[in-house]
Amino acid sequence: MNDNKKRWIRLLCFAFAALIPFLFAASALLFLPKAYGETFLGELAEKYRRLTDTDEPKIILIGGSSVAFGFDSAYMEEKTGYKVVNFGLYATLGTKMMLDLSEANINRGDIVVIAPELDEQTLSLYFNSSSAWQGLEGNLSMLSHIGSDNYGSLLAALPDYLGKRAGYAFSGEKLSPSGIYRRDSFNEYGDISYPREYNVMTFSYDKSQTIRLEEDIVDPEYLVYLNEYIDRASHAGAEVYFTFCPMNAMAMAENTTDASIEAFYGFLNDNLRCRVISDPRDAIMDAGYFYDTNYHLNDAGVRVHTSLVTADILRTLGKTDQAILELPEPPGKKPEDTIGPGGEYTEDPNEKYFIYEDFGGALRIIGVTSEARYMTSVELPATAEGKKVLVVGPSAFKGCEALSEVIIGDSYTLIEDGAFADCPTIRRIVMNRENSDSLEASPDVFKNAPDSLKIYFLTQSSFATFSAGYWWGLHAARMVKP
């Protein structure tokens, strides 16, 4: 065999060897059992199916979870005469991904309504590859519509995603979340139809999520991308409108004034190549209309927001005679029994290890006492000083010199940013609870926490609920199966 042939054989062998990982990944994507079909992100494939199957003139509502929680599509369909596709799901996917996917079936005569949450993440080119894979799992053809600029990060996240999917396949486990954040909470339009009568937030708003209406929350690169998208949709014969997501009035930044709202409104009008059809003041709604975040509406809030946006669409179409507003009163918070002076109160033996501050009639942990300083394991108290303890504040365990383990029961509703900072010895968080929906994790809950800190569970079902949950799914890499 001459040298030239040997060289070609070596090149072919090298090329084949280089292809093996890609062939393995492709096989795994095609043949491994799906793991995320029952999760919140599992709804993406169904939303995409409705989008691509609806050829007649339609209204496509695009955004994050505020769109999923914010519209009654059947009502909008009845009032406008258009089919409606609710194409909002989860801000952690990024607005860009939903816009990219929506181009799969934008036709002449369609109306595209863009309504992202108003914060720095959703108004940027942010893209979360790990969450994207979970959503794409239900229909891999969606990959063809993802922007090529996101392929690199998708490829980098693929091994971890496939590893987790294989783990579920070989263990026989299924991710079956409980509560509202699961696939079967959606109706056929893509709206969240899970009953939610009241505001369930401890203080009627999420204190960790301030809403600012200022120009600097809009990334200039995102603005360029969005205008290019608007141009393409317009070229396809669709009308594109921008409207405002619902915003909890209690969560607005302190410096929000009528003048600042008007300035932000003007900024969007001047810089978007589509019509801004709504007044942002209509979208700043009473806290009683919200459910579990500053952007998620309860049932009454949905009726108000849908009615307002539908009226805006009809007015834009010149059909003002059909723009009838339906505005129920805000139901507010669900009446609950509270523990307080004169009420039933059982002393919690772990109460003595912590320092508290009042937090809207309940308590928030803000530090530890000298008795906790050298403890290696501590369980958070359910009650203290005759009140419920509901919140873990920033650096709550600062000063603990030996603490390795923290056990969290089912009474807690919020763990704030940096809760586990300034405690370098902490290694284990034990979730002694099943429901992840009722325990909100602030976005930077693990800020300045040790990399070795892991989350443990007492049951498989608790692990499944947290690892696929709305608040905790982003921290799945820290989770350990029981």
Image (tube, grey):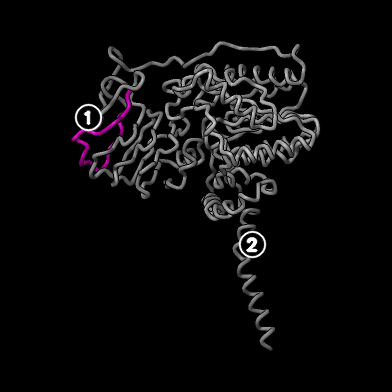
> Where in the figure is residue 160, as x and y percent of width and height?
52, 53
Please give the name of the residue rendered at 50% of the width and 25% of the height, measured from the top-left corner.
294
Decide which of 338, 142 is in the foreground and name it: 142
> Relative to residue 77, is residue 420 depicted above or below?
below
> Where in the figure is residue 472, as x and y percent of width and height?
46, 38
Residue that sits furthest to the left in the current view:
370
Decide which of 204, 459 is in the foreground and name it: 204
> Relative to residue 162, is residue 384 depicted above or below?
above
Residue that badge 1 annotates: 352
Q: Quadrant of residue 284?
A: top right
Please give the name of the residue rendered at 52% of the width and 51% of the height, measured from the top-left corner.
164
Given the image, on which type of amino acid does mark 1 rest? Lys
How far apart marks 2 and 1 lie (CA) works out to 58 Å
Residue that badge 2 annotates: 23
Image quadrant occupied by the N terminus: bottom right
Q: Are marks 2 and 1 in contact (CB under 8 Å)?
A: no
Q: Which residues are magenta?
A: 363-381
> Would residue 128 be counted in the magenta stretch?
no
Given the image, on which type of amino acid does mark 2 rest? Leu
Res. 188 in view: no
Mark 2 falls on what kind of element? Answer: helix
Please give the name of the residue rendered at 61% of the width and 58% of the height, measured from the top-left corner.
25
**Which numbered disc, 2 or 1, marks the residue that appears first in the sequence?**
2
> Where in the figure is residue 208, as x and y percent of width and height?
43, 30
Crowding near the residue tagged with mark 1, few <14, some 14–19, many ≥20 C-alpha atoms within 10 Å: some
Res. 300 in view: yes
Q: Quadrant of residue 381?
A: top left
> Relative to residue 107, is residue 74 depicted above or below?
above
Please give the name of the residue rendered at 28% of the width and 37% of the height, measured from the top-left corner.
397
Q: Is residue 350 left or right of residue 154?
A: left
Decide which of 435, 125 is in the foreground and name it: 125
